[in-house]
Structure formats: structure tokens, C-alpha cells
Image: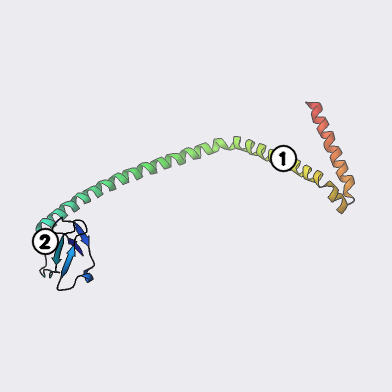
């Protein structure tokens, strides 16, 4: 319950169970004024609103909002139509461009695959060279094959250097 000091008009929130039915003295925490407060019976009458004024205002607001909604719907439909037209144009342009783009992409893809293959092959050779001794211990016949592989790679390296 909110109680207002009659001296300084300061408002305080007080638990209603602290005030008995016969009332009690209260003291303002702001101005130290003391007064007697008794809980009064609430008015049993129901308040009535002026229905005509309230309903007319509400109806006017509803009509304005309905008009705004209709305008927004029309704008939304126009925007959707523009977007759909642009999508169709983009799809047409893409279908026309797909035919002309296929040939250059194939060459680029082939070159990319070639680079990946070369890098993978070099990584495999480095791995074999690093693990040469443990591989020879497990597979004794592999020593001659690895020796020939590394001699062949050395010859290819010398050939490439001579070309340059």
C-alpha cells in the first residue's frame, strides 16, 4: 500500500498488515512529521467510462491502422514483384553465362589437380626418405628399390637443371 505524508507529500510503500483496523500513528521518514492513519473502506461503486468517446477514438485509431496496413501490403507486393523479376533476370543471365564459362574452368581445374598431384608426390618421397631405415629393417628387399628410386630422382633433378 502507498501512503502519502500530509506535510511534505512524500510517498511511502507500507505493508498493509502493519496497520491495524483501528489505525495507528505514522512518522514520515523525510520530514519527521507524525500523523494518525486509519485504513478507510474502499468505495464500492464501480467507475464507469464514457463509452461513446472511448469507442469513437478507438474506432478512428483502428481505421487509421487498417489504412496503414493496406498501404504496407501494397508496398510489400510491389517489392516482391521487383525481387521476383530480378531473380528471373539473374537466372537467365546465369544460364547464358554458364555455357561460356565452362571451357576456361576446365583448364584451371586441370592445372589445380596437377599442382596437388606434384605436391603430394614430393611429400611421399620426403616421407619415404625420412623412414628409409625403419622400412629397410622391416622389408629387407626394399633397400634396392629405394636406392634405384632415389638415383632416378637424382637423374631427373640433373636433367631439369640442364634444361634451365
Q: Which mark is residue 49?
A: 2
Give the residue at mark 1: 119
Q: Dot 2 lies on which element?
A: loop
Q: Residue 134: where, in percent of width, then height?
A: 84, 50
The quadrant the C terminus occupies is top right
Tag 1 near tag 2, CB within 8 Å: no
User: How many circles with numbers are drawn on the protein?
Assistant: 2
- N-terminal of the pair, mark 1 or mark 2, is 2
Q: Outermost residue toward the bottom?
A: 21
Q: Residue 97: where, in percent of width, then height?
A: 51, 36
Report how far apart the C-alphas of labels 1 and 2 lie in the structure. 86 Å
Q: Answer few, some or many: residues within 10 Å of disc 1's Cα (few below 14, many 20 plus, some between 14 and 19).
A: few
> In this picture, is 59 found above or below 39?
above
> In this picture, is 9 found above or below 77?
below
Of the pair 18 and 68, the residue shown nearer to us: 18
> In this picture, is 47 found above or below 63?
below
Q: Dot 1 lies on which element?
A: helix
- Asked if residue 47 lies left or right of residue 126, the reply is left
The quadrant the N terminus occupies is bottom left
Q: Residue 20: where, in percent of width, then height?
A: 18, 73
Residue shown at 82%/34% (left/top)? Answer: 156
Tag nearer the camera, 1 or 2: 2
Of the pair 6 and 54, the residue shown nearer to us: 6
Residue shown at 89%/47% (left/top)? Answer: 143
Q: Answer few, some or many: residues within 10 Å of disc 2's Cα (few below 14, many 20 plus, some between 14 and 19).
A: few
> In this picture, is 8 found above or below 98?
below
Amino acid at each position: 500500500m502507498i501512503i502519502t505524508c500530509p506535510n511534505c507529500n512524500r510517498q511511502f510503500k507500507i505493508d498493509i498488515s502493519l496497520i491495524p483496523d483501528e489505525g495507528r500513528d505514522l512518522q514520515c521518514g523525510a520530514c519527521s512529521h507524525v500523523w494518525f492513519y486509519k485504513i478507510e473502506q474502499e468505495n464500492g461503486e464501480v467507475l464507469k467510462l464514457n463509452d461513446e468517446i472511448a469507442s469513437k477514438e478507438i474506432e478512428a485509431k483502428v481505421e487509421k491502422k487498417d489504412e496503414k496496413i493496406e498501404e504496407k501490403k501494397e508496398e510489400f507486393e510491389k517489392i516482391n514483384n521487383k525481387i521476383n523479376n530480378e531473380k528471373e533476370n539473374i537466372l537467365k543471365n546465369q544460364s547464358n553465362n554458364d555455357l561460356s564459362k565452362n571451357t576456361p574452368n576446365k583448364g584451371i581445374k586441370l592445372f589445380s589437380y596437377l599442382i596437388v598431384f606434384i605436391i603430394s608426390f614430393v611429400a611421399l618421397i620426403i616421407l619415404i626418405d625420412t623412414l628409409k631405415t625403419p622400412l629397410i629393417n622391416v622389408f629387407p628387399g626394399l633397400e634396392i628399390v629405394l636406392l634405384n628410386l632415389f638415383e632416378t630422382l637424382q637423374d631427373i633433378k640433373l636433367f631439369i637443371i640442364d634444361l634451365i
